[in-house]
Amino acid sequence: MSIIYKREDLGEGIHFTSLINKRQKLNNIFIYLLTPLSGDTASENAVIPYVLCGSSRNYPTLTDLNKKLSELYGAVIKGSVSKMGDSQSLSLMAGCINNRYTFDGEKITEEMTKMLADCLTDPNISENCFEEKDFELKKQELLDDIDAEINEKRAYAFKRANMNIFKNEPAAISVKGDREHAEKINARSAYERYKELLRTAQIEIFFVGAEYSETCRNILAEAFSKLDRNYAGDNHSDRSPVKSEICRVTEEHDVAQSKMVMAFKTDCENIVALKLMNAIFGATPISKLFMNVREKLSLCYYCSSGVNEKKGVVYVDSGVEHSNVGKAEAEILNQLDAVRNGDFSDDEMENARRAIVNSWKGVGDGARSIAEWYFNQSYMGRSDPPEKQIELLMNVSRDDVISAAESLKLDTVYVLSGKEEVR
């Protein structure tokens, strides 16, 4: 993958990054607004991108907006919200085919860029608030999403586990907030919050396409130049401190099988070594957790591990019969000890390395994966292309992997248990 990377300042706390990949047949723009996670504002923030992506002053209804997008060869504008460590990321994206594929050379990328800029900076408002009817629909969708979180038990267990893993830290807060706060927001309060975000948020813009567009860059620069900025500073996440005693929490719920989340805190600075250790430990179908805890011993329905680089946490996420919770925890710790003791073959290490390399080589396959790679890099204060990370990964030694495993300290064990199982 060959990506031409260029990052430019468009104003205080506003950056425009172009990611040019000759293989791209679509042009995509991603605009991220980063702000610290807070229980008081999470729900209000979460509804905003969904309100913005449905209209603007020039296209005041979703029908108007979609009609124009259809004329641009089926262009799209979407909104989303996600969590990045201690930060909340609100995003708008727009995508369309490259101008070279239009029938008469229409400049649809430029039109799409203007529409996206308008959605973000010139929304459809009425009496100094978001249009009431549309807002209430989006608010109800947010409430429905919050209520629905409980239905996906694995994700729900992970959410509840995070509340304990990151107790008294911003990362403990759900990315969409909670129903109590969501019920209180209204079209006026959300609009005031939106204006505050435009003033204070870190704004990262990524243009992904086959060639650099000076026009698109200038359209966005002009739109953002009109903002009344009072920039609050770049976002960052603090590593989560390990607890003085292991936190053990079991909660009852209506589940057919228990869900167990174990969290290990780490101070390991060699992130690529940590990721390779994680792949050997539990992140792949050939990992120790999968091959031993799940397949050989049948202690879990699923069992895998993951790394939260921003918070310095390695998770183990498993589905298990309640009667096997203790056995599963013990065997998970046993497999971690095996990695700490260097009890893994050269083949295991190289297969894990290849799995990561294949994943990173696939970054260039889609515009979103390209943008998210560099967005994550910028959040961590880097700008490494996948090739650079692969180069670092290829130099990770067996001792580096062992050292990464030795750095893990068990912090939290959370179990979501069926009510009938604990009686």
Image (cartoon, rainbow, N blue to C red):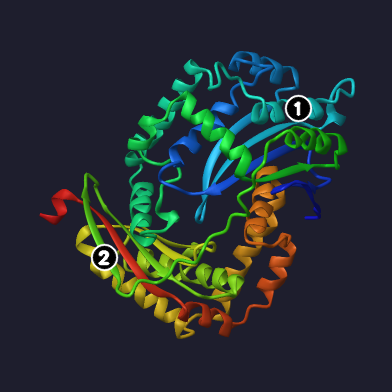
Considering the numbered disc 2 on the image, is that residue within a helix, a strand or a loop?
strand
Q: Residues within 10 Å of mark 1 (few under 14, many from 20)?
A: some
Residue 135 is left or right of residue 92, and the answer is left
Which labelled disc corresponds to residue 114?
1
Amino acid bearing label 2: Arg
Position of residue 230 measured from the top left corner of the image (x, y, whole percent): 64, 44
Inter-mark Cα distance, 1 to 2: 52 Å
Amino acid bearing label 1: Lys
Tally of marks: 2
Residue 370 is left or right of residue 325, and the answer is right
Residue visible at 21% across and 59% down in the picture: 322
Most foreground residue, 88 or 23: 88
Most foreground residue, 167 or 318: 167
Residue 329 is left or right of residue 16, and the answer is left
Residue visible at 26% across and 65% down in the picture: 248
Residue 216 lies in what quarter of the image?
top right
Q: Which of marks 2 and 1 precedes in the sequence? A: 1
Most foreground residue, 346 or 29: 29
Mark 1 and mark 2 in contact? Answer it, CB < 8 Å.
no
Residue 62, placed above or below residue 229 = above
Residue 176 is left or right of residue 88, and the answer is left
Q: Nearer the viewer, mark 1 or mark 2?
A: 1
Residue 67 makes an appearance in the image:
yes
Residue 265, placed above or below residue 370 = below
Q: Check the picture and name the quadrant holding the C terminus.
A: bottom left
- Mark 2 lies on residue: 248
